[in-house]
């Protein structure tokens, strides 16, 4: 594991990212939204629904913005990578540090939701427990993608590109079926979309509630997605010149 | 068996563009730095000094040539344990404190007592008061000192310093000088880029003059420089003529002084002065000032 993740780098990235005012504000908003969800629904499975989902998506973007580029552009990366550690473990460390901040914020919101449920004189159930890993794994997949993009894109443009691509896709999804004159393409494009990024794993929460067999596919897909992003990020980083000249 | 040189560079080339009088980058650079030796890279801006350093460290990809650190491939992790690099104007993560940034480098360098050692180093460099302040609030000089501390925290056997005096106050420059001399005493090899010739003169063992991406000359400071001094019988009468023929020379009283590339040029110099009408009573060689050498070798004034 230490070959994949440098823990001193992860700790430094955690400290650095968690001290951002925006991250703190979003974490508070996320916890408030999750608490409200728990209070209103009286069910822990709603922890990351509605506004809470919006806040953790934005939080993921803020944490992933410039995650690697910041270090490359300031030149700090070249100092760190002159130490006896591989680029893969440095990349893994940066990603792990940001992921730990995300996990901490999600865990705080998750607990807030649990408190909201208890305040309604109900007990948090198994579905409430499952919401945390389900939300985290999906968000981690997006974070890994942002980290990989951040190797080649400067500062916050990794987030900008992702938003641009998302908008372009939504537009295509709307236009293509009509342009081709066949509404069945709506379904086709919907099916394609499921593979254009990490998948929503919250269906597991509903399955747990109804005591039906949960589909672990999205969860496993998200883990595979994050691993692929890590690999792509490391390959791009290995090709990069670390010195600041020309940047 | 003797240990390999801390740094050995042969045929090192990285060309961004070609231009009249040289290249943008580095071409065919070759030099070595021995244990306990302090070597300076001197040259005008854009000469390729920083590029040479970054190539030696493997931070830039070279077009061709070879770099060996302690006789090994620079990419080997074990080799990297033995090197330190302080860049010009280093930037550390803005939200981390100086002590935390240094602790990170200490841990990565494999020091078990990284936190304690970080604070000791900051104290040594006069930064203890600012140790727990965010790096984003540091002045240029403080960041420079932190960069130096970062380079030293792994107790390197080979140290690269890029413009280490930039932004330092006189006390900081003096502390750096003392530190370099102490490191030399411990056998640490140092490569530095600096425009502060007076400091280079005081601490360096060798100087590499670089211009247009090419190594012009290596000068051993331990052997002294070369300056010609001629005593003239008719100095006042030939003053104007000499300033035309040898504009880099200085006439003080009856003595005409000028930097020369090597002792062999002395007869030619005496002839030139004689042809300009000067009656040479005495001619001798003395050690040259580094600045004179720099102007002569790099700027082509002789």
Image (tube, coloured by chain):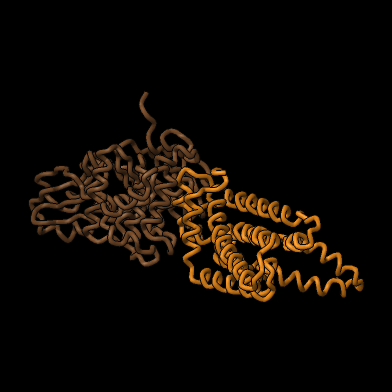
- Chain B appears in which tint? brown
Res. A68 visible in picture:
no
Q: Is residue B141 above or below residue B69?
A: below
Nearer to me, A90 or A210: A210
Q: Residue furthest front?
A: A121
The residue lying at 39 percent from left, 43 percent from top is B111
Res. A111 visible in picture:
yes
Q: How many numbered circles are shown?
A: 0
Nearer to me, B163 or A34: A34
Indicate the position of residue A82 as horizontal and vertical percent values: 45, 47
Indicate the position of residue B65 as horizontal and vertical percent values: 49, 40
Using residue B296 as the reference point, say whether residue B15 is left or right of it: right
Nearer to me, B301 or B292: B292
Indicate the position of residue B46 as horizontal and vertical percent values: 41, 57
The residue lying at 53 percent from left, 68 percent from top is A23
Using residue A66 as the reference point, say whether residue B40 is left or right of it: left
The residue lying at 29 percent from left, 50 percent from top is B120
Among the chains pictured, the one given orange colouring is: A
């Amino acid at each position: 594991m230490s070959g994949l993740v440098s823990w001193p780098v992860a700790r430094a990235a955690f400290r650095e990212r968690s001290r951002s005012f925006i991250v703190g504000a979003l974490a508070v908003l996320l916890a408030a939204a999750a608490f409200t969800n728990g209070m209103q629904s009286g069910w822990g499975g709603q922890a990351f629904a509605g506004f809470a989902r919006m806040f953790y998506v934005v939080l993921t973007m803020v944490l992933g913005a410039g995650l690697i580029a910041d270090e490359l552009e300031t030149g700090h990366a070249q100092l760190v990578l002159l130490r006896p550690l591989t680029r893969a473990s440095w990349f893994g460390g940066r990603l792990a540090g940001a992921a730990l901040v995300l996990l901490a914020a999600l865990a705080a919101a998750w607990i807030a939701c649990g408190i909201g449920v208890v305040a309604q004189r109900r007990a948090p159930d198994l579905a409430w427990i499952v919401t945390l890993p389900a939300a985290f794994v999906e968000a981690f997949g997006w974070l890994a993608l942002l980290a990989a993009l951040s190797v080649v894109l400067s500062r916050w443009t990794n987030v900008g590109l992702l938003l641009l691509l998302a908008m372009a896709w939504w537009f295509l999804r709307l236009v293509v079926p009509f342009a081709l004159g066949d509404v069945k393409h709506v379904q086709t494009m919907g099916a394609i979309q499921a593979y254009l990024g990490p998948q929503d794993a919250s269906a597991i929460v509903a399955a747990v509630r109804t005591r039906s067999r949960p589909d672990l596919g999205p969860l496993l897909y998200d883990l595979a997605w994050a691993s692929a992003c890590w690999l792509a990020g490391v390959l791009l980083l290995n090709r990069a010149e670390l010195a600041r000249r020309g940047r | 068996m003797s240990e390999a040189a801390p740094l050995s560079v042969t045929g090192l080339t990285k060309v961004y563009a070609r231009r009249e009088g040289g290249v943008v980058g580095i071409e065919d650079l070759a030099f070595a730095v021995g244990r306990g030796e302090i070597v300076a890279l001197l040259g005008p801006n854009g000469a390729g000094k920083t590029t040479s350093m970054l190539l030696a460290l493997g931070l830039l990809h070279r077009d061709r040539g070879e770099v060996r650190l302690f006789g090994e491939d620079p990419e080997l992790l074990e080799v990297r344990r033995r090197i330190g690099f302080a860049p010009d104007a280093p930037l550390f993560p803005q939200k981390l404190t100086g002590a935390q940034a240094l602790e990170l480098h200490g841990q990565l360098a494999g020091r078990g007592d990284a936190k304690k050692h970080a604070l000791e180093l900051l104290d040594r460099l006069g930064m203890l008061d600012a140790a727990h302040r965010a790096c984003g609030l540091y002045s240029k000089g403080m960041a420079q000192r932190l960069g130096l501390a970062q380079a030293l925290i792994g107790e390197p056997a080979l140290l690269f310093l890029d413009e280490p005096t930039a932004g330092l106050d006189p006390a900081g420059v003096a502390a750096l000088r003392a530190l370099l001399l102490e490191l030399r005493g411990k056998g640490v090899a140092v490569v530095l880029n600096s425009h502060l010739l007076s400091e280079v003169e005081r601490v360096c063992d060798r100087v590499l003059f670089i211009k247009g991406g090419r190594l012009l000359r290596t000068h051993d400071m331990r052997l002294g420089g070369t300056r010609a001094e001629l005593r003239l019988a008719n100095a006042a009468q030939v003053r104007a003529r000499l300033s035309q023929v040898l504009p880099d020379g200085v006439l003080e009283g009856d003595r005409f002084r000028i930097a020369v590339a090597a002792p062999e040029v002395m007869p030619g110099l005496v002839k030139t002065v004689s042809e300009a009408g000067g009656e040479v009573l005495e001619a001798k060689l003395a050690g040259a000032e580094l600045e004179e050498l720099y102007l002569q070798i790099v700027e082509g004034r002789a």
